[in-house]
């Protein structure tokens, strides 16, 4: 993700995703949202991967707490709100806008509920909401994987592909997270 995000900091507007956003180049708030979203998302992806590591949790709980706080702050204050604004301006019309906006809202809610439950020392509920939150964080990867793979198998107009990928980037992740949470609860 860092490799994908890095070129955008060159200041050029004629590269990658920005080529599709030429109509928003005048919107200063969109620019702020874009750069804060891609910057924070790289850190959130990395921070989230450490949170499910049993060794870190068992041997270094203070590291788990510090990185967890960083994850929560970045999602709640930076990544989800900026993602929501970008979602409202998404390419692909209403269907894509609803997808990306709903993704950001759920990401915020699940992360907030994870935080509230850790404060209450409700560890299992906290963990379940973090699984949901991180499944949505991981949509950054899923979306790009679907964007690379799906066109090899399905031939549709680019805008239809974009809308499809907008939903496939996160809905299967969340369904898988729910399945895992349910499976895990049956083992307990």
Image (cartoon, rainbow, N blue to C red):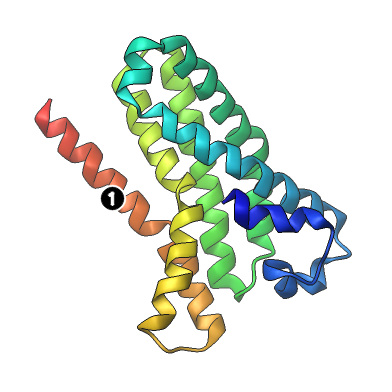
Residue 62: x %, y % from top left: 47, 10
What residue lies at 79% left-to-right and 72% top-to-bottom? 14
Q: Nearer the viewer, residue 42 or 24?
A: 42
According to the picture, the residue beneath numbered tag 1 turns out to be 176
Residue 6: x %, y % from top left: 69, 52
**In the visual, does 51 lie left or right of 35?**
left
Which quarter of the rendering shows the C terminus? top left
**In the visual, does 70 lie left or right of 120?**
right
**In the visual, does 146 lie left or right of 66?**
left
Q: Is residue 152 above or below residue 138?
A: below
Q: How many marks?
A: 1
Residue 61: x %, y % from top left: 41, 11
Q: Is residue 18 above or below residue 126?
A: below
What residue lies at 46% left-to-right and 34% top-to-bottom? 48
Residue at disc 1, secondary structure = helix
Residue 145: x %, y % from top left: 44, 64
Tell me the crowding category of disc 1: few under 14, some 14 to 19, or many 20 or more residues within 10 angstroms, Cα based. Answer: some
What residue lies at 30% left-to-right and 52% top-to-bottom? 175
What residue lies at 34% left-to-right and 58% top-to-bottom? 172
Q: Is residue 117 above or below residue 36?
A: above
């Amino acid at each position: 993700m860092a490799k994908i995000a890095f070129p955008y900091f060159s200041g050029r507007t004629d590269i990658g995703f920005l080529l599709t956003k030429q109509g928003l180049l005048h919107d200063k708030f969109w620019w702020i949202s874009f750069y804060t979203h891609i910057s924070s998302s790289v850190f959130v992806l990395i921070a989230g991967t450490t949170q499910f590591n049993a060794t870190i949790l068992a041997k270094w709980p203070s590291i788990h707490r510090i990185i967890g706080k960083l994850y929560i702050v970045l999602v709640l204050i930076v990544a989800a709100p900026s993602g929501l604004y970008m979602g409202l301006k998404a390419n692909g019309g209403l269907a894509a806008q609803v997808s990306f906006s709903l993704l950001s809202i759920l990401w915020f809610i699940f992360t907030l509920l994870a935080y509230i439950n850790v404060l209450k020392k409700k560890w299992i509920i906290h963990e379940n909401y973090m699984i949901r939150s991180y499944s949505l964080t991981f949509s950054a990867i899923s979306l790009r994987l679907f964007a690379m793979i799906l066109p090899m198998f399905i031939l549709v107009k680019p805008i239809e592909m974009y809308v499809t990928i907008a939903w496939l980037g996160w809905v299967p992740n969340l369904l898988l997270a729910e399945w895992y949470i349910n499976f895990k609860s049956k083992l307990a």
